[in-house]
Amino acid sequence: NERGTSFFGRKTCDLLFKGNGQNLPGFMIGRQLTVVCSFFLVASITGLNIEPGQGNNIFGIKDGAQKFLNYGFHGAVITTILASITWQLAASAFPIAFLNNPVTYILLVFALFLEWTGLCSGAWVLARVMKSALGIQYDEVYVGTPEERMANNHADKEMTIGQDVGHLTGGGFAGHLVGSHDALDGPIQ
């Protein structure tokens, strides 16, 4: 029920959490690869080739600004805002509507395909090296399981309708609703 109410919502969740959730990290890697490719694509499209200091600067801007525009970084910034952050905000504010969208399923399949190609397999090697070198463990080791947090008076707090998912104050924006500021500090009074 919580995984979406439409055909694509269920299909998206089934694929994402298939095999004990192993597709979720694969999706994150494929998604990041897609974003990086978008950066380079948009930068190459929006990059300019105007020689600064010749008086031909676009919109009459200064030479330093023209050099910046020649590299296409402004396209990467726009891509970051439009193609990455906007979608994350929309997904956190309206998760069921986002899951039920067929485009979400298509993008998930595409991201998993990119991860399957092995282009970013080095990320798994780096993650294992970091885990071993720094002694990083699963979150449950640091903050406990939900049952342990409840037993130690660190349970999640109830949310009001104004803080619920679907509102920009809810979902991922309501970090203060967990049992403490930091799991090691004790409960919020």
Image (cartoon, rainbow, N blue to C red):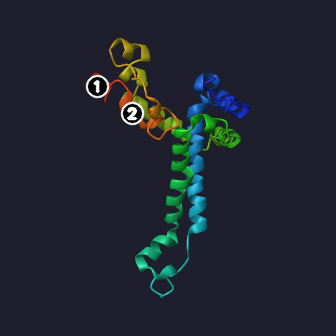
Q: Residues within 10 Å of mark 1 (few under 14, many from 20)?
A: few
Q: Residue 116 in the image: x percent, y percent?
A: 66, 38
Q: Quadrant of the C terminus?
A: top left
41 up-or-down from 1: above or below? below
Task: Evaluate if marks 2 and 1 touch, with contact meaning CB atoms under 8 Å apart.
Answer: no
Closer-to-camera residue (90/159): 159
Q: Residue at x 71, y 34 (%)?
A: 8
Q: Residue 86 in the image: x percent, y percent?
A: 53, 49
Q: Residue at x 51, y 49 (%)?
A: 85
Residue highlighted by disc 1: 188
Q: Label 2, label 1: how many angstroms apart (C-alpha)?
A: 12 Å
Q: Residue furthest top?
A: 151
Answer left or right for 69 relative to 1. left
Q: Tag 1's secondary structure?
A: loop
Residue 159 appearing in the image? yes
Mark 2 vs mark 1: which is more N-terminal? 2
Q: Tag 2's secondary structure?
A: helix
Q: Which mark is residue 53?
A: none
Q: Quadrant of the N terminus?
A: top right
Q: Amino acid at mark 2?
A: Gly
**Which image quadrant for residue 65?**
bottom left
Q: Residues within 10 Å of mark 2 (few under 14, many from 20)?
A: few
Closer-to-camera residue (134/114): 114
Residue highlighted by disc 2: 175
Q: Residue 164 in the image: x percent, y percent?
A: 48, 32
Q: Residue furthest bottom?
A: 55
